[in-house]
Image: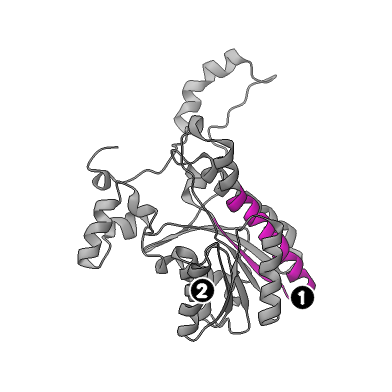
Amino acid sequence: MDLSNKVAIVTGSGRGLGLAYAKDLARHGAAVVINDVDKETADNAVAEIRALGGRAVAVVAPVGPTETAEQLVATAVEEFGRLDIMVTNAGILRDAVVWKTSDEAFDAVTTVHLRGTFTCVREAVQRFREQGEGGRIICIGSPAGQRGNFGQTSYSGSKAAIVGMVRTWAMELERAGITANAVCPVAVTAMTETVPIFRPHIEAARETGTLPALLRRDIGMGTVEDAAGIITFLASDAAADITGQAFAIGGDRVALWTHPQLSGISYHNDGWSAEDLAAAWPSLSAHRESVGEEFPAELIGGGK
């Protein structure tokens, strides 16, 4: 896992998961460009990495505009001479049910998550192709993008689209030796601490110093550090043949998200009328998919 000759950009890396990714990359030798919208937060992250013996600089700018993507890549090249790894982690939330979601809130979330991922990857790929030595694209998704989540139209939609883009980029970039993968982490952060079903377990963990197995194994939720190793692995030469995948990571659990698959396949000569579909639905309905996350009963007090 030696990344001493590698240079990485991690968007949204001033705190939380992004900072954990940046610190792990730096610990393995990579030079890192930190990104945040708050200068003090970004500067503190750089100082923390440098205090650990790592190399880091900061770009303070909102992710989304092409100009920010250009600035991030230019800074990597000017400060460290090249670019090898792009980790698109920046994100915001504007949660609301669909009938209460404003245009402004929808656009704010999709601009950072979806457009920001696109613009940063596009700029990184152009640099990778110029260098002619391959590269690593690692885009941060979410279980919400795979299964949906109440009140998160723009977030879930953006995260689902990110995995779709990653699958496409894996095909487009293979010939250039550039891999593209998605990581869908679950970790204890300021955001997840506010979720009612998680809150009592997280508060109890503060007293014991350990998250319960119910979270770490059954739910796959751990610390932000638990989710960082997969970023370093995918950035390394050991992952040179891994592309187009969507990983789930958290706590003690790692897994791969599968493609949506056809199920309950039926055929009807000369096509399907509305009446034919109504007659076939009872057998087809046995294959219906669930929506949202499904949690163990003990996590939610025996209820569903």
Q: Nearer the viewer, residue 252 or 40?
A: 40
The residue stretch that appears in magenta = 111-140
Q: Amino acid at mark 1?
A: Gln
Label 1: element kind: helix
Q: Is residue 204 left or right of residue 248?
A: left
Q: What residue sits 63% from the left and 15% below the top?
A: 273
Residue 204 is a magenta residue: no
In front of the other: 172 or 55: 55
Position above or below: 181 against 48: above
Location of mark 2 (residue): 43
Q: Pointers 1 and 2 in contact (CB under 8 A)?
A: no
Does 239 sit left or right of 290 as displayed?
Answer: right
Mark number displayed over residue 131: 1
The spot of residue 43 in percent (x, y) is 51, 73
Q: Earlier in the sequence, mark 1 or mark 2?
A: 2
Q: Residue at x 70, y 19 (%)?
A: 270
Position of residue 179 relative to residue 91, above or below, is below
How far across and how far down the image is residue 106, in percent?
A: 57, 41
